[in-house]
Amino acid sequence: MLLRTPGRPSVALISDRTSLPRFWATVWLTGLGGAGKSENTQKARLRHIGAFYEACDARYGPDALDRAIGGGHVNAVLAMLGDFYLTVSTIQSPDSWDVSRWEAVRAFSKAVALLLTPWDAAWNVVPHYLESLGEIRRGDEGKFRFVRALPDLVLDELLAIAHPESELNPFKDERVRWRNWLIVHLLLLGGLRRGESLLLQVDSLKHDVDRVTGQLIYWLDVTTTEYEDERATKPSIKTAESHRQIPVLSDLVAIYEHYVNEMRVSDGDVPFLLTSARSSALSAESVTKMFEQYTAALSPVAYARFYECTGGKRHISPHDLRHTSATARYALFMAQEDGSKELTLQRMRAFFGWSVTSKMPELYAKAAIQDDLLRSWNDLFDKRILRLRAGNQ
């Protein structure tokens, strides 16, 4: 069971039997590998580690894992790890949840063992044992992974449907239409994750004067906020590298400012940029439902194309627009005069908030090369997206 706390860490793993914190899980969370992660990531990992604790309780008795670690009973811990690995790895078709569960338990156990090794060298065997057990592979691993931009037809129809003046737009409220139009552009032109867009504040758009050209330049501050967030699903910044500043095109600036100055619903107490019709901070679920309604408005031909190219997905998701943005950005970065592959990958990591070791840019490089056989990315951005400013549909 998870429990929110008023201090640090902000969430704790609690024993269902005693309602007391799981000791070594708390130690791990405060500095051995859990610190620095978003609250949502912490919660997911703690749930996985909690399942490990519960399995140990059921087989070896209450608080068996904490007692074994605290008592220096290395062999008992190895037995518990072996039992849990067997339980998870023998599932007929492990999914991503099962894979993540074992990875969280491995990381937790390894971190605790490394902490204790200076006092007792016997703990040194735990990382080697975990290495021998290995990883758990998803049942569908080896199948083609669809990391693709939205097909031309689907993107064109989506933008036509989502435009605030479109007769196809499923939303009736003008303010909601403009808010949704801004969300589409934040994801598509800014390459933001859904949670990052929901964390933006009204003043997240910044500007300055370029000393060389004398023109105004704009950027978005993508980061966390100190304001209290009362949403049930709290948006978060995924990694340390995800805190960033991204350059903003004039198209996005115009939509952003029009929404803030003319269309945003606010009673003055909500600092977040995107608000609901009732003046509360917009929820993650609302954004997902927004794209479900846009998907339902697609023509049968466009929907069939989307379904085929995404491996059977039923709805356009916010992340599909980030996929589209990343695939196109790769081609644009490569097209620059100094666009070597290595420099392009570095720019991709900085723009999209990936770590320096992330393999995501390579996935989008492959996707860009595949789609380049079908269309020109310069045509996509120069002639399609960049002309989609208000009133130019």
Image (cartoon, rainbow, N blue to C red):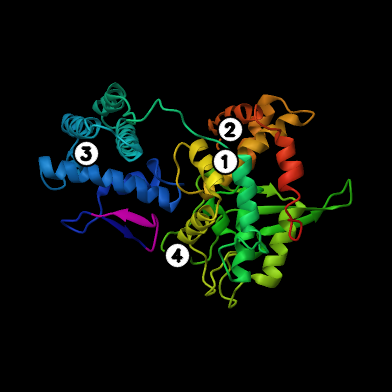
Looking at the image, which is closer to me, 92 or 119? 92
Which residue lies at the image location 35% right of the left edge and 45% below the top edge?
A: 45
Marks 1 and 4: CB-CB under 8 Å? no
At numbered mark 4, what does the secondary structure look like: helix, strand or loop?
Answer: loop
At numbered mark 2, what does the secondary structure look like: helix, strand or loop?
Answer: helix
Q: Quadrant of residue 337?
A: top right
Tell me the distance, in whole angstroms, between the alpha carbons under discs 3 and 2. 43 Å
Residue 119 horizontal/vertical position (percent): 28, 32
Residue type beneath disc 1: His
Residue 159 horizontal/vertical position (percent): 64, 52
Q: Is residue 283 left or right of residue 254?
A: left
- Region rendered in magenta: 6-14
Look at the image and say whether residue 12 sits in the magenta stretch. Answer: yes
Q: Is residue 216 left or right of residue 66?
A: right
Marks 1 and 2: CB-CB under 8 Å? yes
The first of marks 3 and 1 along the sequence is 3
The disc at residue 69 is 3
Residue under numbered circle 4? 231
Quarter placement of the C terminus: bottom right
Of badges 2 and 4, the one in the foreground is 2
